[in-house]
Image (spheres, rainbow, N blue to C red):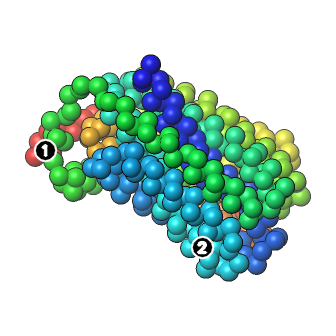
Amino acid sequence: MRSFFLIFIAGVILAVGNGFRMSLGIYVPDLITSTVFSASLIGLTYGIFNLLWGTMSPIAGAFAEQKGYVKTLALGFIGVSLSFYVTSSAISPIHFLLGLGVIGGLSAGVISVPVIIGGVSKYFDDDKTRSTVTGILMSIAASGMFIFTPINQFLVTTFQWSVSFQITAAFFLVMIPLSFIFLIPKPNKKVKKEFTKRKISDVIRQAFKDKSYRYLILGFFVCGLHVALISNYLPTFAKLNGLDTTIAATGLTLVGIFNMIGTLISGRVSGIIKKKFVLSFIYFSRSIAIFLLLIFPTTNFVIIAFSCVIGLLWLSTVPPTSGIVANRFGTRYLSTLFGIVMVSHQAGAFVGSSVGGLVIDLYGSLDIAWIMAIIISLFSAVIHFPIIEKEKSEEVFA
C-alpha cells in the first residue's frame, strides 16, 4: 500500500510539472499577437527554459541524494511559482526571458523526471519491477499534458496569458505538501557495493568513459528536440496552415492521453526485451510519423492522427533509458546520472525551441524544422544498437 501511494503521488508531481511545461506552446499564438515578443524571442526563451531545466536536473538530483528529496522538491515548487508570477508582468523581452526562461527553467529542473525517478527507484531492487514502476510513473506524468493543456487553453482564452500565469503561480504553491511523500521509510535493501563508497565525482567520470552511456546521451538529445518542437509549435503549425489553434490544443491533449498508454507499454516491454531495441523502434517510428505529417495536407484529421501516434512515442523513451542507466550503474546515484542524460535531452529541447521559432520568422513555415527532426530521429534509431545493457563490473569503479 505504501508503494502504491508513493508511486501515485510521485506521478502526480511529475504530472503537474510536465503538464504545465509541455503545454506552454498553447501560449505562443497569444504571446505573438498580444505582446511585442517575436516568435524567435519566445522560442529562445522556451529553449533557455528547457536547457536550464536539464542542466539543473543532475544538480538537483545530487542535492536530493545528499540533503533529502522533501527539501529539494519544496524549493522547486516555490521557484516555479515565483517564475510564473514574475513573468506575468513582463513588458520587455529581457523581463520575459529572465522570468520564464531562467528562473522557470532552473526551478522546473528541481521537480524534474530524473529527480523523481531516482528517488522512487531507491525503493525497488528488481530491474523488471523498476521498469514497470517507471512506466507507471511516466504514465501518470503523461496525464498532466492532457489535463493541463485544455486548462491552459481555457485560461489563455478567458483571461489572456498574464492572468493565466498568475493563476499558475498560485497553483504551484499549493503543490508544496506533495513533497512530503518521500518521508516514507525505504525498505531494507542491499545497495550495490561499488557505489556505496564512491564519490559522486568519480562515478560521473567513470560513467562518461562508458560508450553506452554516451550513446544514451546522444539519443536523448534527439528526444528532447522532438518534444520541444512539437509541444511548442504544433498550435502555431496548425495556425500557419489555416486551422484553428484549438485543434492543436486538442491534439496536445491527445498526445497526453496516448502518452499514458505508450509509457505503460514501454515500461512493461522494457522489462521483457532489450531496452536498446525498444529505443531504436521508438525513434524510427517517430521519423515515420513526422515524415507523414510533412507530406500529407494539413487537416484536422491529420493533426489528430499525428497526435495520437506521436503520443504513443512521446515519453516512452524514459523507462528504457533510465532502466539502462540503472542496470549499468545501480540506483545509488540514478538521480544524478539520469539527470546528466536529461541535460542532453533539454539541450535538444533548446535547439528544437530556438530553431522552430527562427524557422517560422525566416520562412513562415516549419517544414525545414520537420526535415531536421526526421534526419536526426533516424540517426538516433541507429546509435542505440551498440549499447550494452548489462551491469558494469565492480572493477570499472575501483
Q: Nearer the viewer, residue 2 or 311?
A: 2
Q: Front-most of 22 and 63?
A: 63
Residue 169: percent from left, percent from top: 63, 57
Helix, strand or loop at label 1? It is: loop
Q: Mark 2 or mark 1, which has the lower sequence index?
A: 2
Q: In the image, residue 300 lies at what x, y percent?
A: 86, 45
Q: Classify 10 Å Cα crowding around label 1: few (below 14), some (14-19), many (20 and above).
A: few
SS at mark 2 in the image: helix
Amino acid identity at mark 2: Leu
Q: CA distance from mark 2 to mark 1?
A: 42 Å
Residue under circle 2? 97
Q: Quadrant of residue 160?
A: bottom right
Please name the amino acid that badge 1 sits on.
Lys
282 left or right, relative to 248: left
Q: Is residue 239 visible?
A: yes
Residue at horizontal 37%, vertical 36%? 183
Q: Position of residue 374 (x, y in %)?
A: 61, 53
Q: Which mark is residue 269?
A: none
Q: Which residue is labeled 1 in the image? A: 197
Q: Position of residue 294 (x, y in %)?
A: 74, 53
